[in-house]
Every structure is written in C-alpha cells, then in structure tokens.
Amino acid sequence: MGEMTVTTLEGRQGPTTTSPVAGGTDARKGRNLLRRLRTPRRPRLWFEILLIAVSYWTYSLIRNAVPEQKTAALRNADWIWGVEHDLGLAFEHSVNHAVDSVTWLIVGMNYYYATLHFVVTLGVLVWLYRWHPGRYAATRLVLFATTAVALVGYYLYPLAPPRLMPGGDFIDTVVVHNTWGSMASGDLKNMSNQYAAMPSMHIGWSLWCGLTIFALASVPWVKVLGLLYPTATLVVIVATANHFWLDAVGGMICLAFGFGVARFWYGSLPHRLPRQAPDEPPRRKRFAR
C-alpha cells in the first residue's frame, strides 16, 4: 500500500494581531506626551516673541475681517442703552460730558486708551517670563483663550460704541480734541472694525493684568496698583464713549472663560503653580572671593 504524505504549507500568513505589550506602549507614550504638554516648561524667548506677534496679527486680522454689520450694531446699541436705563445705570453720557469738560484729563485718557492696553499687557508678560517662568505658560493661556472667545462675540454680536449712536449726543473725544487716541476714530478708523465693542478687551486684558499682579506681586502697594489698573480702565472706556459698561461685563465673562481653560489644561489656576519651571537649570551659586 502507498504511504500518505502530509504536506505542511509554510509561508502562509495568518491574521495580523496587535501585541498587548505594543498597544500598551503606544497608550503609555500618548499619556506621557499629554502629560508633557500639560506640564509648565521654561519659556523660550524667541518662541514667545514669535507666538505673541503671530497671535496678535491673527487676532487683528480676524477681528477686522468680521463684517461691519452697521444696522445690527446700532440696533444692539439701542437695546444695551435701553437695558441700562431700565437698570437705572445709564451713566455713560454723564461721565462722557463731565470728563470732556476737563481738557487735560480727557486728552490723557485718549492716550491711555490707545497705549496702555498694549504697553501694560506686554509688560506683565515680560515680568512673568523673567520672574515667574513656571506660571508663564498657564497665565499666557488665560490671555489667549480670553481673546479667542472675544472674537466669537464680535462675530455673533456686533455692537456700536456710544460715540457712534445717532442722536445719542455722545462726544467722540478723539475727534473733538484731535488726539491720536484710538484706532477706532479719526484718520485710523478705517483700519479697525467700528462695531466690535462687545466684549471689551480693554477690560478683559486690563483685568487679566490686574489679577495677575495682585496674585503674584509681593509688595502690597503693587498689589493695590494691580487692582486700580482695570478700575481706571473702566472709567477711561466709558469717559471716551468707546464702550458701555455692559461691554466690560462681557470682557469679564471672557476672562472667566480663559481662567477655566487654563484650570482645565494645567489642573490648577496659574498663580498656584510652582514659580520656577520644572526643567529650569539650577541657579549658579555666587561665592565670595
């Protein structure tokens, strides 16, 4: 009888499966990457300068690209003005006229409105970078998230400032006193969206500065100055007829959102993070000669 031969088929590949060890390694790498991204690191100067420049350019581009819906903006301004009257807090007109009667004061406020918004904010960022590197990234994230959500407000709720309300009898202080006081008035008005008043980023940014200084400064009078800055800014935006006080409330809400984003991402409010970044090299000890 003949013998039966069993032939083994070699080289045939079965279904490919993922090794549990390999899968676990990938998941672990993903968690480690996320942990690194959520851990404050020492900021790099060149990167921060580039990031801030590009971010502000993008913010300005988007803000000014939002359609200037004049009809809707004026209608919303009338509604805001009516709500403030119903609340018995429509004081913008009185403040605008009272401060405008003191020339040196209103001219100073025009320049305050145009310059400190940028100068103080950049100054606080530099201070954080130099003295609180471990808290810098989280605090910067608050500012960026606040500004980003404000852009949504500009798109969804166009709003005319008081100075542009027909029949409102508000004084455009930049035009009247012929000062370089705002990108939203005079010869520079075509470079800025006239109907992006809600929320007020003058308040959002100044309150960010004020709270940051108050939380991190070690000198009591500096803490007080920190709180006075957004308070003075509120007076300025109202006196120059660039905002309703309710615009300031909108800025505060945006800032609260920014703090919420930072709290979610870093697991802590910025001022509670370590002052020094975890990977910061140790300071050199100085020895007496």
Image: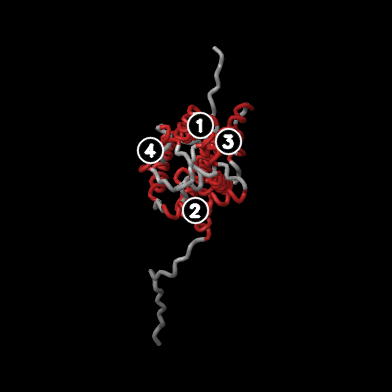
Residue 164: percent from left, percent from top: 44, 45
Q: Nearer the viewer, mark 1 or mark 3?
A: 1
**Residue at image mark 1:** 101
Front label number (1 vs 2):
1
Q: Residue at x 62, y 26 (%)?
A: 221
Position of the N terminus by quadrant? bottom left
Residue tagged by mark 4?
186
Residue plotted at (56% across, 16% down): 287
Label 1 crowding class (10 Å Cα cut-off): few <14, some 14-19, many 20+? few
Q: How many numbered discs, if any?
A: 4
Q: Secondary structure at mark 3?
A: helix
Disc 2 target residue: 76
- The residue at the far top in this view is 289
Quarter of the image for the C terminus: give it. top right
Amino acid type at mark 1: Ser
Q: Work out how far the residue at label 2 is from the one at label 3, CA to CA, in angstroms.
A: 25 Å
Q: Position of residue 284 (x, y in %)?
A: 53, 24
> In the rendered structure, which disc, 1 or 3, sits on the residue that comes first in sequence?
1
Image position of 154 with respect to 110: above or below: below
